[in-house]
Image (cartoon, rainbow, N blue to C red):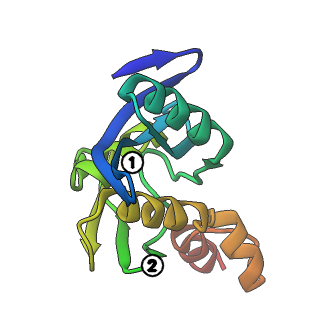
Amino acid sequence: MIRTDEFENEIIDIRRVSKVTKGGRNLRFRVTMVIGDRKGRVGVGVGNTVEIPRAIQQAIRDAKKNMITVKTDGSTVPHEIVGRFKAGRVLIKPAYPGTGVIAGTTVGAICRLAGLSDVLTKSIGTTNPLTLSRAAINGLASMRSRDEIASLRGENGKSETSREEEADEA
């Protein structure tokens, strides 16, 4: 784990990729990296160069450009959601406090660096770390807070227990 300014970084994947040309194979390295501040901001970036250290720097720059803000409900997510990207799907579910991050390496790194400490996930459809990371970011970006959902439903945001208490008083 590398620390730069206010963000923590974690390398998800390093792959050697090649392009076949008339002159032979051109080898390069693709680095997939996630950065986050553990306070709700997270991003995934990809760097692709001949040298691994330059690819890492490129991935960090790309991740900073693609930052999102995750809506949290304490230490978990407000509701269940499925993030989709190409063939990959990632199911993200809220969990009780103390559960921890139950996820694979790719989605787990994203959740931890986003500041989620209690979440359940399931990767469906692919095992490619780049596709899974983009699907997880897609799902976390489309998350809505409790207040947003209540306003869409036309409610004033009161919980079920407070409504029951009002009914008891009447």
Give left or right: position of 133 versus 36. Answer: left
| Total tally of numbered discs in the picture | 2
Q: Name the residue under label 1.
A: 111
Front residue of this view, candidates 100 and 35: 35
Frontmost residue, 134 versus 96:
134
Q: Which mark is residue 54?
A: none
Q: Who's the residue at 69% across and 74% down the image?
A: 150
- Residue beneath the point at 36% across and 71% down: 90
Residue 119, picture quadrant: bottom left
Q: In this view, does 29 lie to the left or right of 157?
A: left
Q: Mark 2 points at which residue?
A: 86
Residue at x-position 58% and y-position 69%? 159
What amino acid is found at the position of numbered circle 2 in the picture?
Lys
Image x and y of residue 136, in percent: 43, 62
In the picture provided, is 128 more to the left or to the right than 35? left
Residue 133 vs 152, above or below: the answer is above
Give the Cα distance between marks 2 and 1.
20 Å
Q: Which of marks 2 and 1 is nearer the N terminus?
A: 2
The N terminus, quarter of image: top left
Number of other residues with Cα within 10 Å of mark 2, as a class: few under 14, some 14 to 19, many 20 or more: few
Q: Is mark 2 on a helix, strand or loop?
A: loop
Give x and y (percent) for residue 126.
26, 73
| SS assignment at label 1 | helix
Instruction: Decide: few, some or many residues near mark 1? Use Cα within 10 Å; few <14, some 14-19, many ≥20.
Output: many
Residue at the bottom extreme?
A: 153
Q: Where is residue 165 in the image (x, y as percent from the top left)?
A: 56, 70
Q: Position of residue 76 (x, y in %)?
A: 42, 52
Task: Say if 35 sits above or below 96 in the image.
Answer: above
Q: Image point 34% across, 35% down: which residue?
A: 11
Name the amino acid type tagged 1.
Cys
